[in-house]
Amino acid sequence: MKSNLHMYVMAVPLLTAFLVNICGRTNRKAIAPLVLGALGFSSLLAIFVLRQTLTFGDLSYTVGGWTPPWGIELLVDPLSALMLLLISGISFLATFAALPCVKRDLEDRQHIFFTLYLILIAGLMGLVLTADAFNLYVMLEITSITTYGLIALGRGRAPLSSFNYIIMGSVAACFYLLGVGYLYLLTGTLNMAHIATYLPALQGSGALATALAFILVGLWIKMAFFPLHGWLPRAYSDAPDGAGLLIAPLMTKVTVYLMVRLMLTFQSPAFPLLSMDVGTLIVWAAAIGIICASSLALGQRNLKLMLTYIIIAEVGYMVGGAWLANEQGMTGALLHIVNDALMTLCLFLAAVAIAYRTGSFHFDSLKGLYRKMPLTMAAFTVGAFAMIGIPPTCGFFSKWYLLLGGIEAGQWQFVVALIFSSLVNAVLFFRIIEIAYFGSLQESEHHGDAITERQEAPWWILSPLALTAVLLIVVGLSTGPLVNNIIRVMIPVSF
Amino acid sequence: MEDIAAHIMAKYNYWIYVVLMMIGFYAMIGKRNLVKKLLGMNIFQTSIILFFISTGAKKGGSIPILDKYAALQGAVDVNQVVNPLPHVLMLTAIVVGVSVTGVALAVMQRIYRKYGTLEEDEILLKIENE
């Protein structure tokens, strides 16, 4: 159906970004209502778009009146509507906590921070909406450039981490662009659905394989798929707290979604992209990546760095699951995109709340936190349980689908990696819980100190954290409708 | 030997882009100076831009400014006109490249103010000593 509703979801944060820059310069109090208003409006619209797509099917908008395949098409199907809701919802929640952090860290540069922040959100939405391969490159660079800027605003060695990310990110973007160039040479079109119609005739062509390889490697660098992950840990942990809250849950997940969408668009009975032998190789790489990243996470003594290594392991889950080339694996991968975004948001919010009070992400500063910040730690525990995969939190269900997919495909190395990673996560989080629960008890007995007072994080950080923790369980319990109504519908019957 | 030379000559534009790309890639990975890395990144991007532009070229092709009515009646021979789409795409890609370079230069300025050098090894040493 023709509609321009979904375009407004993206346009609102984009236009507000400039308003924030102009108004925030003179009046800092205007920033919070503007940003929250825009993102709240986007979230409501995204819910409406999701309902529209579920009743009327895909919504399509052609930019500038040039009909596809010549013009740029903004297409939204139930799955991308779900991603749209995920992006707007998570950024809305993250903004509550980002506001006090930015106020503390970047007192006189708040308007610059939130301009970049909103453009980044608009770029992420654009990535999900666009149906044009070259437009995708532009959106990819919009999100990346704003992320470079946001990371460089951090303290300490943040500029150096940002520079390394710029170099790696540009290589990735160039690879993707080169792949699109090859595809354009082969098919003469840039609309993704239109490209897919030419692919069966090109089967077995070396140029097509090169094009797909360049595109995949480009996206893998952007999503930090092991062993192309080198830039991620430092870049994400050096970013200012407010930026990390948005970047960590969304950037890698949206890139994984792009890969899955390209796979699903190009896949057809005449062109079985997914059942090629390469799939097995990629699942092997994912399995090795999960194990290595989990082991690296074990070696960290800094909460934020540890979480970044977990993100890399989770990317392995999703890439591996998607390339298992069966319905269960694909369902698991898509469900895990939603769940992992929420879990990462929950854990990062908790980490930021802790650091807001204690001033450090180091494990030593976690001692006695269950007494000092009981609500924060309760939410952290829910997030940790989701990451480990304990029912009824949502992490369990996507992991269950991934395991079923791995068993069905006979890819036992992937199953082993998943179980190994869950065990490592259990060790990681129970170690933190132990430090936070028992840590101070012995010390205070030793020194004879009084029990420390309750010192929760401010309401602005605590309320989105509590809400996310509740969402983790709600999404977990509503896995059935989510899978049956939205995710399964989008997976082609051909495999 | 002649075969290889003929092979290279037949598709020399692709060879040029591959060679340029490898030079850029080497500078990005092999050099330890941040400015050289950035220059390598620019060469890398330029090679891809040249690749795109060269794909639009046609032997004896003229500029793609057409008479609307002639085009609608099918009186225009496509082989006589250069393909304009790659040029348009690359205009966007150049803008993207300039923005990335701008951000990278700004970030580099911050690095220089903080550490007083742009050699990666020296910066890492200073970070360790902090």
Image (cartoon, grey):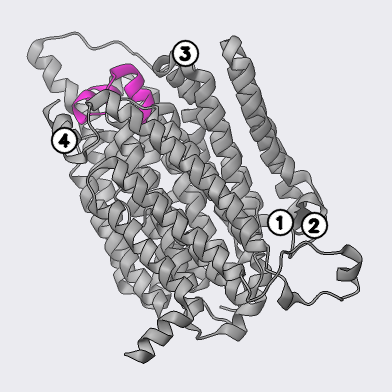
> How far is mark 3 from mark 4, CA to CA?
31 Å
Regarding residue A180, the answer to whether it shows in the image is no
> How far is mark 3 from mark 2, CA to CA?
43 Å
Instruction: Residue A365: say if magenta.
Output: yes
Please check whether the numbered discs 1 and 3 fall on a single chain: yes
**Does residue A58 appear to the left or right of A372 in the view shown?**
right
The mark nearer the N terminus, 1 or 3, is 1
The amino acid marked with disc number 4 is: Glu
Q: Nearer the viewer, mark 2 or mark 4?
A: 4
Q: Residue A107: give its label.
A: none
Please check whether the numbered discs 3 and 4 fall on a single chain: no
The mark nearer the N terminus, 3 or 2, is 2
Q: Position of residue A424 (x, y in %)?
A: 24, 51
From which residue to which does the magenta span run? A350-369
Q: Secondary structure at mark 3?
A: helix
Which residue bears the numbered disc 3? A108
Say which quarter of the image contains residue B79: bottom right
Write the residue at 50% across / 84% down. A205
Q: Chain of mark 1?
A: A
Which residue bears the numbered disc 4? B122
Which residue bears the numbered disc 1? A72
Say whether marks 3 and 4 touch (CB < 8 Å).
no
